[in-house]
Amino acid sequence: MEVTRRDLFKFTGLAAAGVVGASALAGCAPKTAAETATLADTGSADAGLPAFLQAPEPITDFADTREYDVVVVGAGESGLSAAHSAVAAGAKVACVQNIGTAQTTGNMGASVDTTKTDEAGIQACVAFLMEKNAYRSNRKLLEAWARNSYEAVTWWADTAAEGGAESKPYDSEREYNGYTYYLHANTYNHLEGAHNDAALAVCDAVAAEGVEFFFNSPAVQLYKEGERVAGVICETEEGNVLFKAAKGVILASGDCSGNQEMRDYYCPDLRGFKTMSPFRDGMGMMAGIWAGAQMTPVNHSKMVHGGGALTRLELPFLNLDIHGERFMNEVLSFAYLNNLMREYLEEYDFQNPMAAKFFTIMPANWVEIGEQWAAAHPNEVKFGVGNMKIPSEDQFVKGETFAELAANINAYMEVEEWHIDPIDEQTIVASIEAYNELCATGADGQFGKRADYLVPIEQGPFFAVPRGANSVPAVLGGLTVNENQQCLGAEGAPIEGLFAVGNASGQFYGGVDYPMDVEGLSIGRAITSGYVTGRYVAAL
Ligand SMILES: Cc1cc2nc3c(=O)[nH]c(=O)nc-3n(C[C@H](O)[C@H](O)[C@H](O)COP(=O)(O)OP(=O)(O)OC[C@H]3O[C@@H](n4cnc5c(N)ncnc54)[C@H](O)[C@@H]3O)c2cc1C
């Protein structure tokens, strides 16, 4: 890993050379089956528990000890926001980061514009998210986001802009239960590093405010005094360093999408989908669990995205799978598509994420038809998400005839190295012709799609849009917290001194999948929960 300008913020004595990452962490918890077996042989492993749930021996020998009011674990959106608001409230703050730079991902972060939205609108937004999260969210956490997000996200955007990372706003008006609420998001896809460019600028600003950053210093355990969490132990080049926290430790270490073992355990239906962020290794949450915190006790919501604008073209023409057959009612948000693709991943023994791909077959006049549909059913038909660009026809597979389209689909898969068996071209042609006949009947006797959408693929040239998200940006479980983001122990009592924010904290979501209906919710929530919690802990 390259040593970046962020290393300038490192304290002397914690010099960086290379990354203290996964290999260094291997000593903290038994990881492999062999190690687990050895533990079992000696009788010290808890039978049936996965390795990451087994607490290691507490580290008691420290190369150095440093004293702070607040220690933040992780320099992503939630951590930088927590560090800022804690230092702004007068606390002495350290932020420890596992890799050599501040790091996050994404495009947009959303807020409820409370300068325009009235009380009923705020509650309607919360009610909408409760529904989208299958009524398994902690409602108070959703409400905290709705009330505080505008202030937090505006602070983030202003700070990033001062550092040269200017956002583009994305504003929209929504309605639920007859009430209107207004969403405001900052987007960064126009910058080379997208939201991470903003994070780097915010990191500079927060360091200038007085937060002390320690890079290449992964938190590997929490330090307890009695029942109270009183600090964080980090692995550094110098050895284990104890960062004591007089007021509290804030875990802002993100989710566990980069940790295969945790992912398989908490979200087994993600098997076969691609990992996007190895730096989200779940280590911070593990340390929390070993200190008595509880992981969200229900199955974790998955976020399966990737594939850019093509995957987000939600126009319900005809979808054909990797066998050239129609397989679904095409009216479905891309966020939920992954649930239909699992059986295809299984065909390839969960070894080829491209098996989760499919093609949307469209006629030449797709824009005109799509716009008519979108006017009638704006929640079902989308050309993209937020202010993401609509894909151009250059990105589609094209054919003057169905047969040519079929041949070009196979050629495309080969050029793009999908490593998927060629599709029988006659099957593709037959599927399109059968679909056109179905449309002529005016009723979808195959998958029950709304009759409005039964428009035949008639006008050439014809297009096939390669779609299907197959990557995992996040696993949304996290540690259970109360409305102050304070971690809860086994009996539900708050753990003194321990807080979790952003994706390291749970019970904000709850559905099978992350809802894409409030675009940028995940980043907006990370910034907001950090912002509010840093201030809260500093005031303790
Ligand atoms: C490609 C991509 C695009 C996305 N686009 C969007 C989008 O447009 N809108 C949206 O809302 N969401 C988006 N998401 C999801 C979004 O990025 C995350 O939900 C959000 O960044 C979470 O913020 P966080 O602060 O909780 O965690 P993170 O941003 O993951 O930050 C956690 C930080 O903690 C560090 N860390 C981890 N473990 C340790 C440890 N043991 N010790 C010290 N440091 C540690 C990590 O390196 C990281 O820097 C996207 C995700 C991906 C992968």
Image (tube, rainbow, N blue to C red):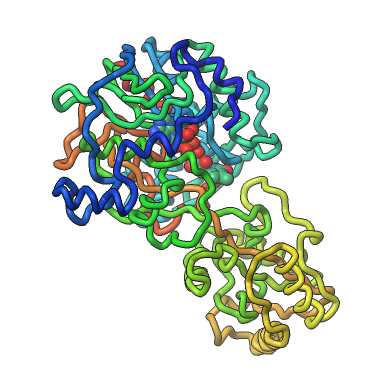
Q: Which residue is drawn at 31% across and 19% down?
A: 242
Quadrant (top left, top right, bottom left, bottom right) of the N terminus: top right
Q: Going by the image, does 14 lie left or right of 466?
A: left
- Please provide percent x and percent y for residue 158: 59, 22
Residue 149 visible in the shown view: no
- Number of on-image labels: 0
Kindly tell me whether residue 285 is visible in this rendering: yes
Camera-side residue of 219 and 512: 219
Q: In which quarter of the image is residue 26?
A: top left
Q: Residue at x 65, y 80 (%)?
A: 324
Q: Position of residue 160 (x, y in %)?
A: 60, 24
Q: Which residue is drawn at 55% across and 76% down?
A: 328
Please tell me whether residue 359 is drawn above or below residue 1 in the rendered image: below
Of the pair 259 and 431, the residue shown nearer to us: 259
Decide: is 64 above or below 122.
above
Q: In which quarter of the image is residue 452?
A: bottom right
Q: In this view, does 288 lie above or below 126?
A: above
Q: Whole-percent x and y of residue 408?
A: 78, 73
**Horizontal relation, residue 518 to residue 53: left or right:** right
Residues 389 and 249: in front is: 249
Q: Looking at the picture, how far across and down is residue 62, in whole percent?
A: 29, 19
In the displayed structure image, the side of residue 479 where residue 433 appears, left or right = right
Q: In which quarter of the image is the C terminus?
A: top left
**Residue at x-position 34% and y-position 18%:** 70
216 or 540, nearer to the observer: 216
